[in-house]
């Protein structure tokens, strides 16, 4: 009789282990690893480590550096000025960005841009994207801090003001325009 109890106990223990493992697997399933903080163009957005302000959207078809044209596109370049201010005791760092468009289209940066503001400072830098002019409705900039090891993150999203009603005007405004984005950034003390 003790052999039966041993086998029964072993079976119950095995079932319990499978149930615990299944619960652990369910709890560790991939889910969103970020929280979206939405803001308005030109308005400061509070984040965990400071404030992010997205402003000054410009469009064109040519890029310049020191006054000389360096790149052209049959599409359109979009330059967005982003200010990262460290208002607390930690650096405000933005290492990644992308543009989201209507219909799920995503535009990666044309160039990699990082902002790092030390406490008490604000760093302003231009984020540059190459886009399809036919797919610019509802462009929304998303910026965030990407880390190798991280927990739950905040991603700031700001609609750039390009809508179905005014997309043609943005396309027309960008035709033939030369843009000279600030690729190095400007740092100043918070006042």
Image (cartoon, grey):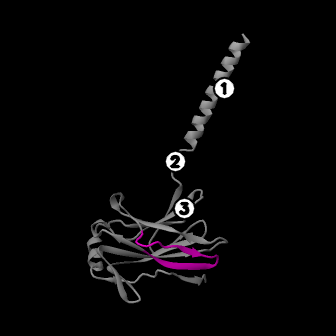
The residue at 67%/22% (across/down) is 10
Q: What stretch is highlighted in magenta?
A: 109-127
Residue 178 in which image quadrant: bottom left
Label 1 SS: helix
Q: Is residue 99 left or right of residue 47?
A: left
Q: Nearer the viewer, mark 3 or mark 1?
A: 1
Residue at the bottom extreme of this rendering: 67
Q: Do the residues labelled 2 and 3 touch (CB within 8 Å)?
A: no
For label 1, the residue is 13
Could you say where residue 69 lies in the image, as x and y percent from the top left? 34, 85
Q: Distance between the residues labelled 2 and 3?
A: 17 Å
How many other residues sit within 10 Å of disc 3, few (<14), some (14-19) or many (≥20)?
some
Any part of residue 77 in sight: yes
Residue at the right extreme of this rendering: 2
Residue 132 in which image quadrant: bottom left
Rendered position, 37 above or below 66: above
For label 3, the residue is 154
| First in sequence: mark 1 vs mark 2 | 1
The residue at 53%/54% (across/down) is 33
Rendered position, 167 above or below 69: above
The answer to if 45 sits in the magenta stretch is: no
Q: Are marks 1 and 2 in contact (CB under 8 Å)?
A: no
Q: Which mark is residue 30?
A: 2
């Amino acid at each position: 009789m003790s052999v039966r109890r041993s086998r029964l106990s072993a079976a119950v223990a095995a079932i319990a282990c499978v149930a615990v493992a299944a619960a652990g697997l369910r709890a560790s399933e991939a889910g969103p690893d970020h929280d979206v903080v939405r803001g308005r163009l030109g308005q400061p957005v509070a984040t965990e480590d400071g404030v992010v302000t997205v402003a000054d959207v410009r469009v064109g078809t040519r890029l310049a550096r020191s006054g000389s044209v360096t790149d052209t596109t049959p599409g359109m370049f979009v330059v967005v000025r982003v200010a990262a201010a460290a208002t607390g005791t930690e650096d405000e760092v933005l290492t990644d960005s992308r543009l989201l468009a209507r219909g799920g289209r995503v535009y990666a940066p044309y160039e990699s841009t990082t902002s790092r503001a030390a406490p008490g400072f604000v760093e302003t830098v231009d984020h540059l994207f190459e886009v399809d002019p036919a797919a610019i409705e509802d462009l929304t900039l998303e910026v965030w801090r990407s880390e190798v090891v991280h927990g739950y993150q905040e991603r700031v999203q700001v609609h750039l003001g390009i809508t179905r009603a005014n997309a043609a005007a943005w396309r027309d405004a960008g035709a033939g325009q030369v843009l000279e984005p600030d690729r190095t950034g400007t740092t100043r003390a918070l006042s």
